[in-house]
Amino acid sequence: DVGPQLSDQKVEQRIVELDQFWQSLYSKINDEMAHLLPLLGNEQQQELFRNIAVRNDKFREEFVDLNEAEMAERYSESLQENYENWIGALTHEQELAVKQVARQLRSSAHLRLQRRQAWQRGLQEILAKQYSTQTMTERLRKFLSAFEVNDNKVMNEISDANKRYIAKLTVQLSRTLTETQKAFFINKTDEYIRLFKNLAENR
């Protein structure tokens, strides 16, 4: 796709496709979790939920408890790191474009934290019941499947708006790639193609 013909709509389409791939992975992981979680002993459950709580606290510290300037800086750093992973070091003009978009992005971190905490509470409530292993697996599968669908209107609106900004930025950067960046991108994508072919052949 990368070339003069690349459009905002094409980038947004690719983002949606990637989201769908992740969704299929979530489904497989959740199904495995529904089978494995009922097998945990009490100490293992306690350790699991301690780890989840620590991760949620870290998420709050890194993404929720930030003022507007700090959030823009975090977005800028994250975007720059992602683009540099694909095209190498950015030019000064490209860095400025990234920072400008970062200031326009909105955060849904507080809503995502609430969702993470609800997920944690839901798992704890199910595992605390004296269900049979089969019943617990069925309840976990139903609960986890519900979390695969995000029906939070505000969160989705923020996500959609951010995707549009990032799509525009991606097109903008694609039209300012240096020859070095183009070569970096081709090598990077060729490596991914090789890896995925190997995985497909050996599965």
Image: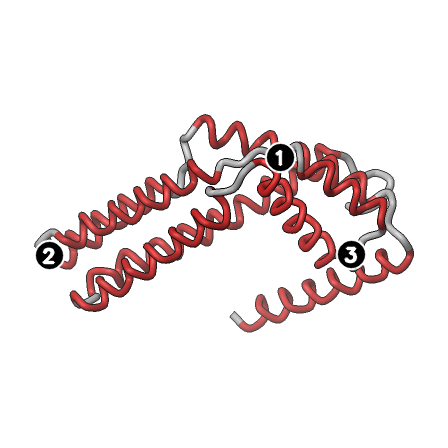
- Provide the residue designation for mark 2: 132
Q: Residues within 10 Å of mark 2 (few under 14, many from 20)?
A: few
Task: Look at the image and tell me in which quarter the N terminus lies.
Answer: top right
Q: Which residue is mark 1?
A: 105
Above or below, 48 against 112 in this view is below
**Which of 161 and 30 lies nearest the eye of the viewer?**
161
Q: Residue at x 81, y 46 (%)?
A: 94
Give the quadrant of residue 46.
bottom left
Q: Quadrant of residue 148?
A: top left
Q: CA distance from mark 1 to mark 3?
A: 22 Å
Please, is residue 106 above or below residue 182 in the view? above
> Which residue is tagged 3?
87
- Kindly identify the amino acid type of the residue bearing the numbered disc 2: Ser
Separation (CA) of disc 1 from disc 2: 46 Å
Determine the residue positioned at 27% across, 44% down.
143
Say whether residue 35 is left or right of residue 77.
left
Q: CA distance from mark 3 to mark 2?
A: 52 Å
Mark 3 or mark 2, whichever is nearer to me:
3
Please name the amino acid that badge 3 sits on. Ile
